[in-house]
């Protein structure tokens, strides 16, 4: 049996102050699965994130960086996935670069990999603003109404996916959608895969968010899910 490896996909934007610390925090996990790597996709950061990443890339052989123009979180994740599906790796693990999650929680998903090709974490105690927590509940309800499926945390950036399976379903998600992770979660649920919804720690970083931009993105995402429901009906 061939060795299983993981490509860790991490989108980032303006995380100059924390990116080094967060990359280093994942080293024990990456080293525990020989042959694995980390791919960070920099979405046109306007601070010094790119300089920090270039230094990290020279320091750590397991790290590759893609710098791109600013196009938004959804397109950035999509680019990382497209790169991963053309790679030699067995699994894809996607998370964010800001340090909300505990790297060791990865093993909760990894230990279940023989039972499903698509496994989700679940922010059971979400350390976030009331607005973002409420938005997650609305999205969960909207997914249930449109697709008749319960997904505890459909957009969570803490997910393990088999490369061969993602290669199959990614073309079914239109390029440029606001939240491709939600669409992928829905497709996996409709394929009757056990998403598991594994509780993982979510840390409070006291980050400031632009609620207006989040609301605009969510509004776009709701309509995209509506059209998606008709497409896959």
Image (tube, helix red, strand yellow):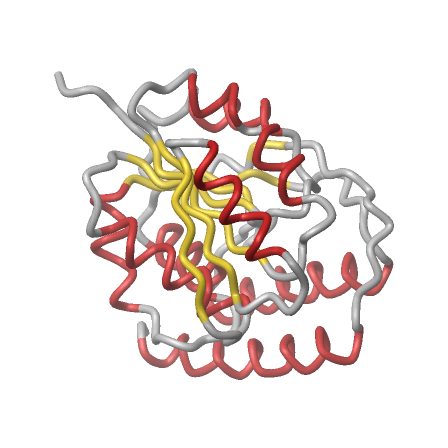
Residue 130 location (% of width, % of height): 86, 59
- Where is the C terminus found, in terms of image quarters? bottom left
Instruction: Pick whichever, 58 or 15, lies toward us.
Output: 58
Rendering coords of residue 141 (x, y %): 63, 64
What residue is drawn where x is 14% and y is 20%? Answer: 2
Left or right placement of residue 157 versus residue 206 in this view:
left
User: How many numbered badges does the structure rendering display?
Assistant: 0
Residue 67 higher or lower than 65, as above or below:
below
Residue positioned 82% across, 45% down in the render: 205
Task: State the image coordinates of residue 119 (x, y, percent, origin top left).
Answer: 43, 38
- Tell me if 119 is positioned left or right of 50 in this view: left
Image: 9 above or below 36:
below
Q: Name the residue at 40% across, 51% down.
A: 189
* Image x and y of residue 231, in percent: 32, 79
Location of residue 1 by image quarter: top left
Say which of 65 and 12 sits in front.
Answer: 65
Q: Is residue 219 left or right of residue 83?
A: right
Q: Give the residue displayed 76% in from the left and 45% down from the top.
A: 126
Relative height, residue 140 to residue 200 (above, below): below
Q: Does residue 75 lie above or below 188 as drawn?
A: below
């Amino acid at each position: 049996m061939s060795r299983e490896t993981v490509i860790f996909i991490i989108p980032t934007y303006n995380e100059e102050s924390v990116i080094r610390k967060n990359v280093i925090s994942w080293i024990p996990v990456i080293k525990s699965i020989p042959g694995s790597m980390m791919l960070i996709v920099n979405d046109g950061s306007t601070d010094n994130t790119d300089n920090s990443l270039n230094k990290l890339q020279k320091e750590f052989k397991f790290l590759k960086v893609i710098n791109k123009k600013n196009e938004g979180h959804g397109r950035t994740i999509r680019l990382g996935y497209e790169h991963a599906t053309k790679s030699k790796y067995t699994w894809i693990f996607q998370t964010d670069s800001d340090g909300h999650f505990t790297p060791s929680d990865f093993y909760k998903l990894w230990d279940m990999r023989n039972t499903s090709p698509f496994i989700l974490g679940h922010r059971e105690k979400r350390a976030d603003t009331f607005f973002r927590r409420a938005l997650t509940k609305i999205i969960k309800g909207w997914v249930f109404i449109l697709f008749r499926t319960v997904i505890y945390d459909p957009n969570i950036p803490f997910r393990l996916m088999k490369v061969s399976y993602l290669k199959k379903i990614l073309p079914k998600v239109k390029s440029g959608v606001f939240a491709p992770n939600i669409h992928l979660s829905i497709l996996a649920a409709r394929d009757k895969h056990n998403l598991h919804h594994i509780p993982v720690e979510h840390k409070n970083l006291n980050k400031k968010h632009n609620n207006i931009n989040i609301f605009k993105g969510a509004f776009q995402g709701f309509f995209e899910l509506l059209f998606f429901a008709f497409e896959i009906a």
